[in-house]
Amino acid sequence: MQTDMRALPTRILQSLDDAIVGKEAVKRFLLVGLLAGGHVLIEGLPGTAKTTTAKNFAKTVGGVFKRIQFAPDTLPADVTGFNLYRVTGESSFIEGPVFANVVLADELNRTTPRTQAALLEAMQEGQVTVEGETHLLPQPYMVIGSQIPYGGPGTYPLTGVQSDRFLLRVWSDMATMDEERQIVRGIDAIERADVTPAAYIEDILLMREEVRTVDVAPSVTEYALQLVQHIRDDSRTRSPLSARATIALHKCGRALAFIDGRDYVIPDDVKALLPHVAHHRLALTSAAETSGVQITTVIQDALNSVPVPRTL
């Protein structure tokens, strides 16, 4: 790795610390997702700084940022864009807010599954197709989705296909009393904070190339495979993890190692990532839900049961 590339993740996280009090896990896993070339879902109760954290993260990494505020009446064309036809017979494509380097899909589960699906092609293939014409999205491209826990008023569950497009899911918790004290005392400065980029688009693309060179030993790959298979075999689940979960552990493990200044992935990287890779991809059987089983329990059981490799 180049020395300047090693320093960039720390600079990005420090820049975020200047604008956001707490939220260490959210900040860290947003950066993991970006460097791994994927998308991140932030879930939490209203007022837990999901939107603020995502917006400031976008500012620290440069590029173009756009926000989509989802609602029950949001249409797919409001996301992807549309063809504008004139009386002369000519038409032109009007880009939707999905055309940006970092897109905040705010309160994604407040809109209908039909509109949620407008993001699928963009998230998977980096393009959108409107009336048979394909339009490429800028690179790097990242969607940060935010949602409140399902079951609140006016929410729609994300489909399994939609959830699977998110590389990671991270929970945004309420601020601790100490954090809230800092926020209240410094609210004027926080609201006026002018976040400047700590990196630029070219830097992100270069870091992604460096991340791909991080070594993953066969034993670590096998560990990830065994964890995913253990969850698949758990009779309490009704939505087996797809291969995207294992791929996510591989890609995110390399990104996490890079952020920590290592050229190799360790089992602890996989252990730290599994809850964020698996949680949003899992659903429990009715019997398990009735008996009070939590998704976190299924994941922890896998971590407790699968032997950790001792050597790399």
Image (cartoon, grey):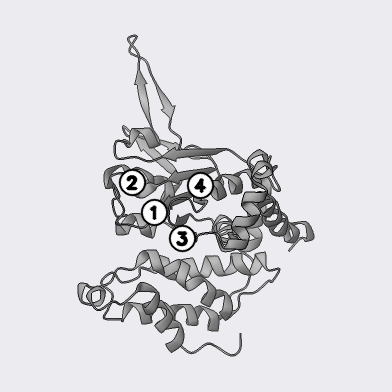
Rounded to the nearest whole Å, what is the CA distance between mark 1 and mark 3? Answer: 18 Å
Label 4, residues with CA under 10 Å away: few <14, some 14-19, many ≥20: many
The amino acid type, in three-letter code, at marker 3 is Leu
Which residue matches tag 4? 51
Q: Residue 148: which numbered mark, if any?
A: 1
Rounded to the nearest whole Å, what is the CA distance between mark 4 and mark 2? 14 Å
Q: Residue at x 36, y 73 (%)?
A: 295
Determine contact: label 1, label 3, CB under 8 Å. no
Identify residue for label 2. 110
Nearer-N-terminus badge (4/3)? 4
Q: Position of residue 2 (x, y in %)?
A: 76, 60
**At label 1, which amino acid type do we have?**
Ile
Can see residue 189? yes
Q: Quadrant of the C terminus?
A: bottom right
Q: Residue at x 36, y 25 (%)?
A: 83
* Labelled disc at residue 32: none
Secondary element type, mark 3: loop
Q: Amino acid at mark 2?
A: Arg
Q: Earlier in the sequence, mark 1 or mark 2?
A: 2
User: How many C-alpha atoms fall within 10 Å of the one at disc 2: few (<14), some, or many (≥20)?
Assistant: many
* Residue 148 to residue 69: above or below: below
In the rendered image, the residue lying farthest to the top is 88
The residue positioned 37% from the left and 82% from the top of the image is 230
Which residue is situated farthest in the right direction here?
Answer: 3
Question: Dot 3 surroundings within 10 Å: few (below 14), some, or many (20 or more)?
Answer: many
Find disc 3 in the rendering and name its residue: 167
Residue type, label 4: Thr
Q: Are marks 1 and 2 in contact (CB under 8 Å)?
A: yes
Q: Which residue is pictured at 31% across the width and 59% down the height?
A: 160
* Left or right relative to 247: residue 188: right
| Nearer-N-terminus badge (4/2) | 4
Label 2, label 3: how many angstroms apart (C-alpha)? 21 Å
